[in-house]
Image (spheres, rainbow, N blue to C red):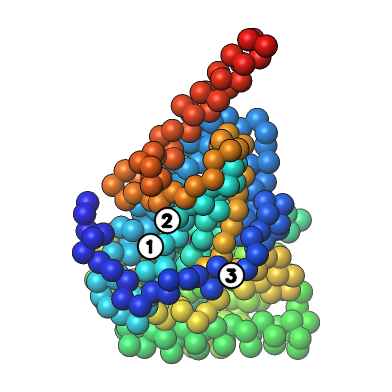
Amino acid sequence: MTEVTTRRPPSFPTKFPYADQPDRSPGFSSSLDTLVQLSFKDTKRTPADTQKDLKRKAIRMKQTFDLIWPLIDLNSSMENQYWSSYYCCRELKQEGVYLRAKYCNKRWCFTCNAIRCAKMINNYMPIFKLHPHAQFVTLTRPNVKAEDLPEEINCLVAEFRIMIRYLRGMKKIDLRGLRKLEVTYNWYENTYHPHFHLIVHMPGAARELIEEWLFRNPTAKRAAQHMREADQGSFTELFKYAAKIAADKDMSPFAQDVIFQALANHRIYQPFGINKVIKDPEDPQEVTQAYGSLDPEIYKVWYFNNDKKDWDSLQGESLIDTIIKSYNYRHETVAAYISDS
Ligand SMILES: [Zn+2]
């Protein structure tokens, strides 16, 4: 695909906001890199594992491009934001066994979402494991047209916040959980469906929540509100960020853009009654990761090649392609040196 050459970011900053900050060493616990780095601390990881990790990253980048190209063509107010995902992990700076990259942290980015999803599960699962009867709750109101979506989301979010404050403060209900804001699209009616998915720690609290929601929202139908015992599937559903948007083949780029615009200033996840365990950054962020099988003597920059789904150096080598070969070469050279001396 050569579509890349026809598009240029019109006013994308040449420098990321974090570019001037000091480098983060691999031990640094920033908000996005912790989980990834933990996995690479395992010294048993082979060059084949490193290759697999980078291949996975390359495939996610390709998925993001497929999603953002039509969105960029819309020339909407979000255009620069979509472009920032084009630059996510595009340039990898190798400093020995470390690879440094800039992550966009956007909601539609498959690369950033995979990390975010894993981090959310790691951070929130231990909390909900303490509550074996936690409930997966859905709260809805009737669908709205595109032009009413921003106002509807503002209203839903405010309503939810007031309701939680009332239930916990005035009614003294022990209410603990996590709220996710999601919007789906009905192509048949051309309407949008903003709704909440929640994990609530106890069935009683979940029931109170649904009753209060129905009381405060007379247009909401009882049959459209749900609660069921939370299982592994519920957590996957809750933490998979953009999956709904990307996987929904019926959703036009226009509808996706309407949703991303309406969600722009809102938090997708909001805990209530429990501490916020992790930050959810939305700005680009520089992250360094260690890959033990990389050549410790190499210092160079790799650029992503959309067609090859690999990172190329200016000298024409490909990163994923050469990992195993160069690792074996180094080890054979060392072995030969030892046997000679
Ligand atoms: Zn990204």
Label 2: few (<14), some (14–19) or many (≥20) C-alpha neighbours in 10 Å: many
The amino acid type of the residue labelled 3 equals Asp
- Tag shown at residue 239: none
Is 293 above or below relative to 4?
A: above
Residue beneath label 3, please? Answer: 20
To which quarter of the image does residue 120 belong? bottom right
Residue beneath label 2, please? Answer: 90
- Tag shown at residue 86: 1
To which quarter of the image does residue 18 belong? bottom right
Residue 245: tell me if it is visible. yes
Q: Earlier in the sequence, mark 3 or mark 2?
A: 3
Image x and y of residue 322, in percent: 43, 33
Q: Is mark 1 within 8 Å of ligand 1?
A: no
Residue 258: tell me if it is visible. no
The amino acid type of the residue labelled 2 equals Arg
Image x and y of residue 90, in percent: 42, 56
Q: Nearer the viewer, mark 3 or mark 1?
A: 3
- Left/right placement of residue 338 relative to residue 252 reads right
Q: CA distance from mark 3 to mark 2?
A: 18 Å
Mark 2 secondary-structure assignment: loop
